């Protein structure tokens, strides 16, 4: 480990950026999504100063593919996204494990237990380990987020395999004192050296690649043992704790609070699992508690290992801890009390039952009047929602969101409903979400002769995740001028005949277009356009 | 047992909770204390109820404060202070603005104040921070700094005023440093 030259308070996501810079990262691509967005936001500000190439890609699959291209050209690359982004990227993730990396590559994935900033599902991205066979590291605090980013590059470099750094909201958005070391500014220029055996997954080669992948994983296993940490191993023979990620902090806190000393095994890599550490840990112990958030993957692994090692060990996990929602130290206190048959005293609290304060649109946001106008024009329509600020249409007073799924799905599902039911339907989608994955669904609706009305809310920024650039605004994430990709031209090229572009302020016109288009037999699109109120305010301030 | 000081800052997204959190964390660094904080970004902070957690002391493990473990609740808005009372220790303190940002079905402001006053804790400071800042400094955004200063000067928060001022100088953009320092000194007048 290099010398600490500066200690400062960093957000987990900022620490990942510094870890990448200290590793000498050359190429960074992201698609923003809470709780991962600040990684891109920081790179957007400082990439140039360190000779790093940075981009906000159109979606996570493209971001990953960009990083794969950089890796194949020998560069050190990092790609960051939220959990659902990995679903989008997964089609290219799987073969990346097979080809492996040339330049090292780290894929940061941010899960959000309790879904603070996530609709869709409470996803546990550790499941991708089983699908992709890509190593997954799990840091527990901001310092470790930095250290494991570097470790990820180290493993990737040593074994020519991509590495996933899996963080959760409480790691990504945790601040603590972090030790920073010297930065290695990127000087690399890549070159793609042709190597068909390495980069082409055509059968029968693909099956050889699979075999090579498993050989790599066997070699990684002993290497990865060293990042697990065993503490107070001799303190008890009756109960020990195995934990990973943020849960390590909750365990330490709970033990402090209960004035207990128990053996703790902290797992640094979920995959490949350092089986030796676990076997050694459970060998001579009567009971073991697995503390992990969401589904009990680790618990199942430990149970399987116990069969050969110590079949008498009793494994506790999701029987005493929830698998829905995030954990905290109090939940660990509860679990330990239950196992140790200690009396658990629920904290006495004073609480007041108050009406919920829903998130709302920013002051001056034009979406408010647009929602009202659309609802007025067709109060009985089915309203399709998508991922972006316009999700807030689902809250009172508008209550106009009848389904909400994943990026771009408002259009795909609209098509299915229109084909199945004779009802009026209006689907909302934002500019960035349209670029991300709305386009194939729009083409499908035209191709298969459907007739939903789609309103593209073009506020010329990716607002909800913190105002990142997108292909519609004529500026890259590094601040360079680029082609402004016009949504109306894409819509026209998709074969849409009923198309209107209306300014946010022109509500009357919008109302009349909605009424007109709802009676059409073909797909209709209204692009409602203007500048995000937040951006307008920022422009005024400066 | 390891002793930490635990602060919950509660308010509404957009009120500057994160800046306030960063200032307190930086003051801890200056005093060589271990510190961890937790906050939420994204949709959850867009005008909805938000809270940040700050824990400091000799050694801090978890960034999260659990129910009945907060030494102090700082409320930038009265209903949000009330909403987070379940975090408070019986011997804890509340410092809150009386200011209310209205929302549908919100509890009446006077009723909210009455409810906080009904809690049997010794140290309660309910003040018109936002309107004082507006009157004296012509700025509402520094109300949190004013509330923080009440905690520091009344020796509720174990951090020195000098460290907080040094932290303000480091965290706040240069052109707002003087304004923030003035807000911090308001409670001394």
Image: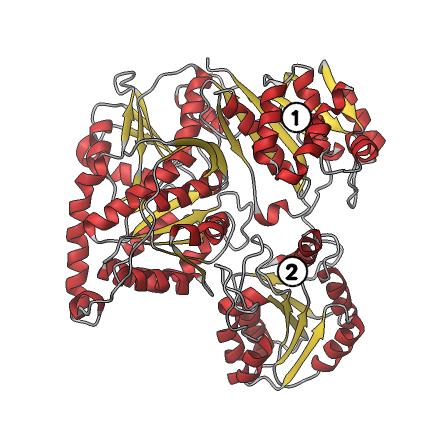
Chain for disc number 1: B
Numbered disc 1: secondary structure: strand
- Left or right relative to A425: residue A474: left
Residues at discs 2 and 1 in contact (Cβ within 8 Å): no
- Give the numbered dot on residue A390: 2
> Residue A101's x, y, as percent?
24, 57
> Residue A139's x, y, as percent?
37, 38
Residue labelled with disc 1: B73
> Residue A315's x, y, as percent?
32, 31
Q: At x 42% / y 40%, what residue is drawn?
A: A15
Residue A392 falls in image quadrant:
bottom right
Colouring scheme, one of rainbow, by chain, secondary structure, one colour: secondary structure
Is A405 in front, or is B102? B102
Numbered disc 2: secondary structure: helix
Badge 1: residue crowd in 10 Å (few <14, some 14–19, many ≥20): many
Same chain under badges 2 and 1? The reply is no
User: Could you tell me which quadrant the N terminus of chain A lies in?
Assistant: top left
Q: At x 25% / y 45%, what residue is drawn?
A: A154
Is A38 in front, or is B49? A38
């Amino acid at each position: 480990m290099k010398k600490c030259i500066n200690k400062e308070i960093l957000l987990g996501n900022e620490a990942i950026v510094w870890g990448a810079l200290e590793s000498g990262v050359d190429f960074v691509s992201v698609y923003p999504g809470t709780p991962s967005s600040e990684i891109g936001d920081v790179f957007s500000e400082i990439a140039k100063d360190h000779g790093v190439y940075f981009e906000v890609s159109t979606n996570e699959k493209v971001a990953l593919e960009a990083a794969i291209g950089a890796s194949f050209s020998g560069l050190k690359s990092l790609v960051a996204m939220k959990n659902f982004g990995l679903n989008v990227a997964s089609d290219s993730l799987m073969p990346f494990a097979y080809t492996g990396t040339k330049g090292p590559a780290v894929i940061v994935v941010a899960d959000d237990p309790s879904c603070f900033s996530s609709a869709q599902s409470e996803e546990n991205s550790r499941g991708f380990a089983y699908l992709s066979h890509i190593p997954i590291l799990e840091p527990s605090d901001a310092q470790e987020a930095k250290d494991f980013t570097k470790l990820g590059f180290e493993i990737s470099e040593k074994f020519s395999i991509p590495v996933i750094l899996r963080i959760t909201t409480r790691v990504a958005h945790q601040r603590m004192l972090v030790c920073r070391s010297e930065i290695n500014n990127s000087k690399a220029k890549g070159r793609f050296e042709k190597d068909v055996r390495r980069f082409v997954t055509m059968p029968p080669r693909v099956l050889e690649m699979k075999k090579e992948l498993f050989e790599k994983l066997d070699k990684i296993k002993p290497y990865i043992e060293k990042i697990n940490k065993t503490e107070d191993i001799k303190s008890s023979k009756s109960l020990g704790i195995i934990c990973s990620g943020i849960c390590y902090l909750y365990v330490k806190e709970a033990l402090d609070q209960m004035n207990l000393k128990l053996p703790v095994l902290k797992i640094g890599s979920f995959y490949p699992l350092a089986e030796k550490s676990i076997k050694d840990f459970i060998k001579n112990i009567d009971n073991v508690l697995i503390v992990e958030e969401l589904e009990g993957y680790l618990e199942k692994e430990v149970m399987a290992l116990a069969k050969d090692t110590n079949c008498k060990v009793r494994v506790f996990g999701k029987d005493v801890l929830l698998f829905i929602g995030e954990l905290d130290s109090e939940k660990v206190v509860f679990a330990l009390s239950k196992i140790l048959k200690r009396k658990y005293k629920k904290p006495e609290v004073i609480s007041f039952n108050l009406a919920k304060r829903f998130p709302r649109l920013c002051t001056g946001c034009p979406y408010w009047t647009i929602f009202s106008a659309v609802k007025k024009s067709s109060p009985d329509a089915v309203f399709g929602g998508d991922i972006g600020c316009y999700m807030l249409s689902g809250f009172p007073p508008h209550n106009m969101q009848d389904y909400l799924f994943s990026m771009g799905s408002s259009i795909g599902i609209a098509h299915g409903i229109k084909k199945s039911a004779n009802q009026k339907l209006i689907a909302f989608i934002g500019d960035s979400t349209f670029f991300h994955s709305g386009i194939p669904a729009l083409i499908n609706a035209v191709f298969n002769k459907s007739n939903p009305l789609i309103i593209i809310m073009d506020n010329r920024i990716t607002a909800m995740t913190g105002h990142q650039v997108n292909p519609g605004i004529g500026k890259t994430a590094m601040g360079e001028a680029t082609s402004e990709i016009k949504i109306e031209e894409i819509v026209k090229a998709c074969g849409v005949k009923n198309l209107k572009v209306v300014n946010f302020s022109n509500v009357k016109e919008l109302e009349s277009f909605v009424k007109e288009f709802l009676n059409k037999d073909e797909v209709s699109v209204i692009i409602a356009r203007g500048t995000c109120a937040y951006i307008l305010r920022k422009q005024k301030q400066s | 047992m390891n002793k930490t000081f635990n602060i919950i800052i509660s308010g509404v997204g957009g009120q500057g909770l994160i800046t306030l959190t960063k200032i307190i964390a930086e003051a801890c660094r200056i005093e060589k204390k271990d510190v961890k904080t937790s906050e939420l970004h994204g949709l959850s902070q867009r005008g909805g109820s938000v809270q940040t957690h700050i824990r400091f002391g000799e050694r801090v493990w978890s960034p999260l404060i659990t129910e009945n473990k907060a030494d102090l609740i700082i409320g930038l808005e009265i209903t949000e202070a009330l909403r987070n009372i379940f975090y408070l220790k019986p011997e804890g303190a509340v410092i809150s603005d009386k200011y209310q940002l209205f929302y549908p079905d919100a509890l009446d402001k006077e009723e909210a104040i009455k409810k906080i006053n009904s809690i049997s804790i010794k140290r309660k400071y309910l003040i018109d921070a936002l309107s004082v800042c507006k009157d004296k400094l012509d700025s509402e955004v520094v109300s949190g700094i004013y509330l923080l200063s009440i905690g520091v000067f009344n020796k509720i928060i174990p951090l020195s005023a000098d460290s907080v001022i040094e932290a303000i100088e480091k965290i706040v953009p240069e052109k707002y440093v003087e304004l923030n320092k003035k807000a911090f000194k308001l409670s001394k007048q």
